[in-house]
Amino acid sequence: INKNFKPDIIDINYGCPVPKVTKKGAGSAALKDLCIMKDITQAVVESVAPTPVTVKMRAGWDKNNIVSTDAGILLESIGVKAITLHGRTTSQQFSGTANWEYIKELKEAIKIPVIGNGDVATFEDYQKIREITGCDGVMIGRAALGNPWIFNNIINNNNRPSINEIKKVCLSHIDLLIKNKTEKVSLNLSKKHLSYYLRNFNQAGMYRRNIMRCDRIAEVIKSIKSIQP
């Protein structure tokens, strides 16, 4: 893999809670058996050296089986270079709230960098998770859906972009879909992603409904262009 692709890092995902993944023993199902997690991770670390291996994981399978700190200590001992911890369990999936105390506990238990993840959607959230956990960095996932500006917002502590900027990015997104996908796939994916973009402004719901009724990608484009600032 190093010879053919030369990756900067290899990140192992022990964080995915989706049933179709965990039913196969993959994703966060590894949290059920730390011995298996160790064997998998150690094999990767040894086979890809000197490329750094990192891990993303959840706090545990459920509230009665929180293993993130034990797993972190184990992963550090076999050569993992950084850990991202989502403060939810697998059974929570994306419900409830992320428990940042698990991130704090992990940070205090190991020396390698710890990246906090879960429920960070604003500059204030970013500040809070850093203060509470002492984590070395923050990962943002769902909050970036329809809001790719969030990273710049956090870095510069500024506000959400104008409606015209949102329209511009929506049209660029659609253009990329058209260039790489069929008409049907472009239509379906545009409806999915535009439902995230078109939120939190006057009559956003109406525009989303109009787009969902579109039968052609050209109609979607027309609907986006009709949005008034």
Image (cartoon, rainbow, N blue to C red):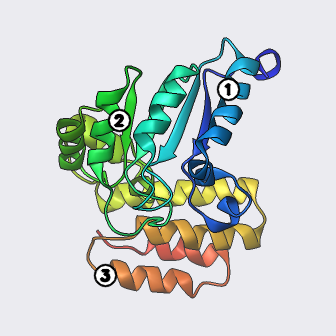
Characterize the local packing of mark 2: few (<14), some (14-19) or many (20 or more) Cα atoms within 10 angstroms: many
The quarter of the picture where the C terminus appears is bottom left
Q: Is residue 22 left or right of residue 90?
A: right
The residue at the point 26 percent across, 54 percent down is 160
Foreground mark, 2 or 3? 2
Q: Earlier in the sequence, mark 2 or mark 3?
A: 2
The quarter of the picture where the N terminus appears is top right
Q: Amino acid at mark 2?
A: Leu
Assess whether mark 1 and mark 2 are in contact (beta carbons under 8 angstroms). no
Q: Earlier in the sequence, mark 3 or mark 1?
A: 1
Nearest the viewer among 207 and 8 is 8
Q: Amino acid at mark 3?
A: Gln
Assess whether mark 1 and mark 3 are in contact (beta carbons under 8 angstroms). no
Q: CA distance from mark 2 to mark 1?
A: 20 Å
Q: Position of residue 114 (x, y in %)?
A: 38, 31
Q: CA distance from mark 3 to mark 1?
A: 53 Å
Secondary structure state at the residue bearing disc 2: helix
Secondary structure state at the residue bearing disc 1: helix
Placement of 108 over or under 151, stated as above or below: above
Nearest the viewer among 26 and 187 is 26
Q: Is residue 66 visible?
A: yes
Q: Position of residue 196 (x, y in %)?
A: 44, 67
Residue 42: mark in rendering:
1
Badge 2 is on which residue? 106
Placement of 91 over or under 58, stated as above or below: below
The residue at the point 53 percent across, 29 percent down is 75
Nearest the viewer among 8 and 213 is 8
When asked about the image quadrant of residue 2, the answer is top right
Placement of 68 over or under 23, stated as above or below: above
Residue 59: mark in rendering:
none
Foreground mark, 3 or 1? 1
